[in-house]
Image: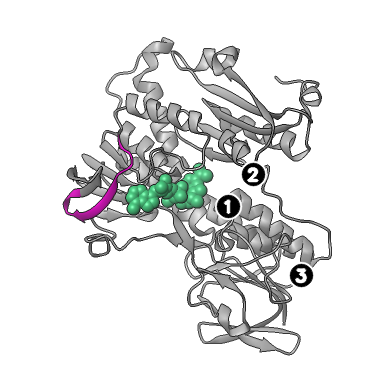
């Protein structure tokens, strides 16, 4: 009998396996697709590989601004996709070898929780039975596919999800992106630079979901400068090869499309893994957990996208760590108040903590301090002609930092510092004593 069975080999699952293996637990991890899950194989990592190619291309094309002349600068999409594959393989191999080194048994099969046995739980995968004292559900999420006419019929061909969009052999001429959230925006950034005519159709009147509104408006304007067309407060009513039919203000219109990306959110992937066989409580597919990532069933834990809190790989890591610490009897708990998020576009957007909109809704007495990125010498040196913003929310009475919201390169590299300030409840005067290079 194993000490721990983990269902799902994405960031939550593999990090939990690493931590538990390191602590000396006998661990068995099940993954039905590829180790590394969506993040490593068809999400975060391959998209960053593509975005870096776009960044290098833009630098080369616009090098003149920096005194660098290059001619015939082109994106070779096939080479970009090949490199993406190499990046993924390197990281997946790294995770696999770490799991091996720590003695984690990896079974590449779909696992189903069968029921309880004396002192634990039974899981079946392939035709074999496995038993463990504890379970960790880390089954991840899948793209939401709405019942819009034409979507299901064309899935994987004319209609793409996060998976196919990262390995297109050719750049589509007219590219329509449904959903102006993180996936939609990162892919709009890549394909607009790579040469597509990109239109983003978003149901809300703003892009980037819960991002600070001032920042998301600035981001939209940056994209518009690169030729991305936004159709806000619009909804897609049908897709058919060659076009997307939308509706806004009661009027119907068509957008030409060679490819359509569906990026309207993700849902927990908890169907068919037998959660009901041991009575694990879920709500619309999401596994319900407490601050220690425990489910309602003793010795059953869950972490990552399938618990539906914040669908981010780095958050999944932390949840996995909290779950394993709890198994080991160490005091730990999940806090989401200092959870950074980044949109890896060019320019980057990085935020952590409360937005102005959230602070107002929560009735917090706060003040806002804003500074243009142009006050940073390095920013001016490296971002010819660009502007950006850093915005900080401060509690009016306690003077601690509640939120930091940035647009401009390289805000993704500094946001963890802001997270540290919020997590440690630093006051402005404490933060001022830190030496920043
Ligand atoms: P999302 O939740 O970020 O955005 C979905 C967008 O689609 C929302 O703005 C929503 O209003 C819109 N929408 C929903 N239904 C629509 C409809 N019928 N027509 C038009 N618009 C519609 O979801 P997304 O972009 O699919 O990303 C999924 C998950 O992956 C997110 O939780 C995200 O945090 C994560 N992710 C994180 C990244 C990062 O941290 N850099 C990168 C990519 C994904």
Could you say which disc has been placed on residue 310 in the image? Answer: 1
Q: Name the residue under label 2.
A: 339
* The residue at label 1 has a CB less than 8 Å from ligand 1: yes
> Mark 2 touching mark 1, by CB under 8 A?
yes
Rendering quarter of residue 186: top left
Which of 136 and 51 lies nearest the eye of the viewer? Answer: 136
Q: In this view, does 148 lie to the left or right of 436?
A: left
- In the rendered image, which quarter contains the C terminus? top right
| 240 magenta-colored | yes
Pick out the residue farthest to the front. Answer: 363
The reply to whether residue 346 is in sight is no
Q: Mark 3 points at which residue?
A: 25
Q: Is residue 183 left or right of residue 106?
A: left
Range of the magenta residues? 230-244
Q: What element carries label 1?
A: loop
Secondary structure of the magenta portion, mostly? strand
Q: How crowded is mark 1: few (under 14 residues within 10 Å), some or many (20 or more)?
A: some
> Mark 3 touching mark 1, by CB under 8 A?
no
Could you say which disc has been placed on residue 383 in the image? Answer: none
- Image location (x, y in percent) of residue 190: 37, 37
In front of the other: label 3 or label 2? 2
Vertically, is 426 above or below 138?
A: above
- Image location (x, y in percent) of residue 91: 54, 51
């Amino acid at each position: 009998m194993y000490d721990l069975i983990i269902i799902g080999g994405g960031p939550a699952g593999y990090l939990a396996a690493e931590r538990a293996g390191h602590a000396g637990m006998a661990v068995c991890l099940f993954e039905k697709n590829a180790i590394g899950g969506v993040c490593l194989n068809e999400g975060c990592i391959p998209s960053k590989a593509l975005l870096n190619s776009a960044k290098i291309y833009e630098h080369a094309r616009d090098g003149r601004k920096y005194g660098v002349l290059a001619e015939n600068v082109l994106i070779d999409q096939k080479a970009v996709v090949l490199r993406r594959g190499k990046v993924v393989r390197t990281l997946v191999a790294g995770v696999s070898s770490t799991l091996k080194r720590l003695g984690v048994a990896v079974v590449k099969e779909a696992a189903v929780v069968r029921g309880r046995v004396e002192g634990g739980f039974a899981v079946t995968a392939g035709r074999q039975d496995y038993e463990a004292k504890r379970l960790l559900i880390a089954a991840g999420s899948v793209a939401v596919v709405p019942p819009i006419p034409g979507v299901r019929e064309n899935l994987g061909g004319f209609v793409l999800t996060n998976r196919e969009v990262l390995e297109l052999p050719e750049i589509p001429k007219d590219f329509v992106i449904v959903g102006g959230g993180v996936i939609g925006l990162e892919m709009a950034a890549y394909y607009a630079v790579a040469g597509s005519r990109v239109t983003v159709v978003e149901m809300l009147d703003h892009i980037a979901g819960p991002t600070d509104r001032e920042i998301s408006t600035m981001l939209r304007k940056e994209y518009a400068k690169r030729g991305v067309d936004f159709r806000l407060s619009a909804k897609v009513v049908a897709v058919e090869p060659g076009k997307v039919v939308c509706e806004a203000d009661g009027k119907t219109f068509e957008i030409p499309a060679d490819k359509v990306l569906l990026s309207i959110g993700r849902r927990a992937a908890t169907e068919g893994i037998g959660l009901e066989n041991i009575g694990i409580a879920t709500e619309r597919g999401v596994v319900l957990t407490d601050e220690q990532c425990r489910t309602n069933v003793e010795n059953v834990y869950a972490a990552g996208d399938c618990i539906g809190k914040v669908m981010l790989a780095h958050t999944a890591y932390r949840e996995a760590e909290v779950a394993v610490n709890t198994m080991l009897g160490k005091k730990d708990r999940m806090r989401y108040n200092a959870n950074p998020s980044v949109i890896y576009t060019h320019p980057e957007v990085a935020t952590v903590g409360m937005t102005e909109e959230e602070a107002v809704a929560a009735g917090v007495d706060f003040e806002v301090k804003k500074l243009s990125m142009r006050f940073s010498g390095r920013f001016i040196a490296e971002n010819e002609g660009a502007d950006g913003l850093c915005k900080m929310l401060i509690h009016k009475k306690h003077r601690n930092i509640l939120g930091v919201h940035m647009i401009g390169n390289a805000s993704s590299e500094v946001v963890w510092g802001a997270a540290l300030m919020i997590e440690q409840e630093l006051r402005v005067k404490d933060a001022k004593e830190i030496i920043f290079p």
